[in-house]
Image (cartoon, grey):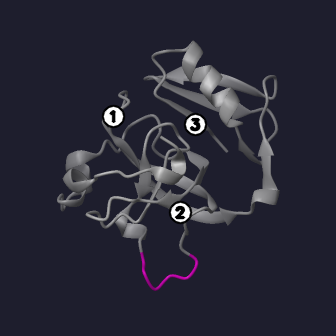
Amino acid sequence: MSDNNLAVNLSEVEKSSSISTLYSLTSNSVGKVVIVKFFDNLNTCNTSNLITKTLMKVGFIDRAFIMPENRNAPRSGEFWKVRIVGEMNPGEGRGCFLLEPLKQVLITDICKLLQGMYTEELKDNILFIHPNDSGHNFVLPLSHKRSISNTLEDIYSVLVCL
């Protein structure tokens, strides 16, 4: 399924009044800053209008950061630097990441990260990528990310940590 055609039903999450009942706030991914691309959520039953699959696991904006009147909020097709604030089902492919949008990143400001330009750290089925050079908006090319996930079968997410 392409990122442009994603439809995710987050009704289990949306019915919860308490984030801590569904999400791990102590997952190894929580607090990491990454770049994602947002798309419209085609499942109109949800209040989460935008989703991302950039992290190889669905991510959506924490409702604490959804402000309809905020004109600086993410829009479909935009890249954003986000902080992971929670994870549903850590260590598993099913579930989702809960995100806090920090800043829009223009496509012209994104740098592709290639082999030899980073170190890897594997924790709880997440591959953390740490660029050797800091201060850039790094992302892994999709083909490289797919190659990693095909090689390491237990990996459910690849995070390029900024």
Lower position in the chain sequence, tag 1 or tag 3: 1
Magenta residue span: 67-72
Q: Position of residue 129 (x, y in %)?
A: 65, 31
From mark 2 to mark 1, how far is it between C-alphas? Answer: 22 Å
The residue shown at (49%, 15%) is 153
Q: Residue at x 56, y 44 (%)?
A: 54
Residue 77: where, in percent of width, then height?
60, 61
Q: Position of residue 34 (x, y in %)?
A: 60, 47
Residue picked out by circle 1: 94
Q: Secondary structure at mark 3?
A: strand
Choose the circle earlier in sequence order: 2 or 3: 2
Quadrant of the image containing the C terminus: top right
At label 1, the amino acid type is Arg
| Residue receiving disc 3 | 159
Residue at label 2?
Answer: 101
> Does the magenta portion include 107?
no
* Residue at figure coordinates x 46%, y 27% from the top left: 156
Task: Give the camera-side residue of 69 and 4.
Answer: 4
Q: Look at 22% across and 55% down and name the residue there.
A: 11
Q: Nearer the viewer, residue 161 or 138?
A: 138
The kind of secondary structure the magenta stretch mainly shows is loop
Query: Would you identify the image quadrant in which residue 89 lies?
Result: top left
- For badge 2, the amino acid type reads Pro
Q: CA distance from mark 1 to mark 3?
A: 16 Å
- Secondary structure beneath disc 1? loop
Which label sits in the foreground, 2 or 1?
1
Classed neighbour count for the residue bearing mark 3: other residues with Cα under 10 Å, few (<14), some (14–19), many (≥20): many
The amino acid beneath tag 3 is Leu
